[in-house]
Image: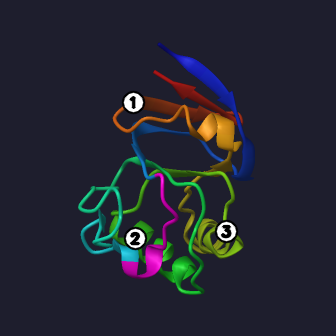
């Protein structure tokens, strides 16, 4: 069953890919290996998940000033997700995406949705993000 979710755009852009969903808070610093593109936080509900080329959804970040650097390095190495969906997007994550865009022309869309809509997200579904909307297939 497909559906469309209206989103608030934090960082503009379009993306398409497989959805990886964590129901827990997440920190890219310490929770993600930018060399491999994998979740390395042992307590994570998606421990070992490969985020490279995926659309990554998690409700909110845990907060780390190093998040911007981690996402920037993952983009540089080609191991980053192609888009991020949150309920509450961290400002420091957006900073990393903005630096990547301005300095290197790399784009990683970041969008936010309601808690209710977040519950509709299921790992493995195909997703297209376009014009501030999430198309779930």
> Rounded to the nearest whole Å, what is the CA distance between mark 1 and mark 3?
24 Å
Kindly report which numbered mark, 2 or 1, lies closer to the viewer in this rendering.
Answer: 1
In-front residue for pair 75/54:
54
Q: Look at the image and tell me in which quarter the C terminus lies.
A: top left
Decide which of tag 2 and tag 1 comes sooner along the chain: 2
Q: Main secondary structure of the magenta part?
A: loop
Mark 1 — residue? Answer: 125
Which class describes the residues within 10 Å of circle 1: few (<14), some (14-19), or many (20+)? Answer: some
Give x and y (percent) for residue 78: 34, 63
Where are the magenta residues, as a range?
A: 23-30
Q: Identify which residue is drawn at 24% across, 69% down.
A: 36
**Is residue 70 toward the left or the right of residue 131 in the image?**
left
Q: Earlier in the sequence, mark 3 or mark 2?
A: 2
Instruction: Compute the Cα span from label 2 to label 1.
Output: 23 Å
Q: Residue at x 53, y 86 (%)?
A: 66
Can you identify the residue that label 2 sits on?
74
Q: Total of numbered circles in the picture?
A: 3
Q: Secondary structure at mark 1?
A: loop
- Magenta includes 14? no
**Residue with the mark numbered 3:** 90
């Amino acid at each position: 069953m497909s559906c469309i979710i209206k989103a608030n755009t934090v960082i503009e852009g379009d993306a398409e890919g497989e959805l990886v969903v964590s129901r827990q808070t997440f920190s890219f610093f310490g929770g993600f290996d930018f060399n491999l593109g994998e979740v390395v936080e042992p307590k994570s509900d998606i421990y070992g998940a490969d985020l490279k080329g995926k659309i990554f959804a998690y409700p909110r970040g845990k907060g780390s000033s190093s998040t911007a650097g981690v996402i920037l390095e993952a983009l540089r190495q080609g191991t980053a997700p192609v888009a991020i969906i949150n309920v509450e997007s961290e400002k420091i994550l957006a900073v990393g995406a903005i630096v990547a865009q301005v300095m290197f022309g790399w784009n990683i869309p970041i969008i936010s949705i309601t808690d209710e809509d977040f519950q509709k997200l299921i790992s493995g579904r195909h997703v297209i993000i376009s014009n501030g909307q999430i198309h779930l297939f």
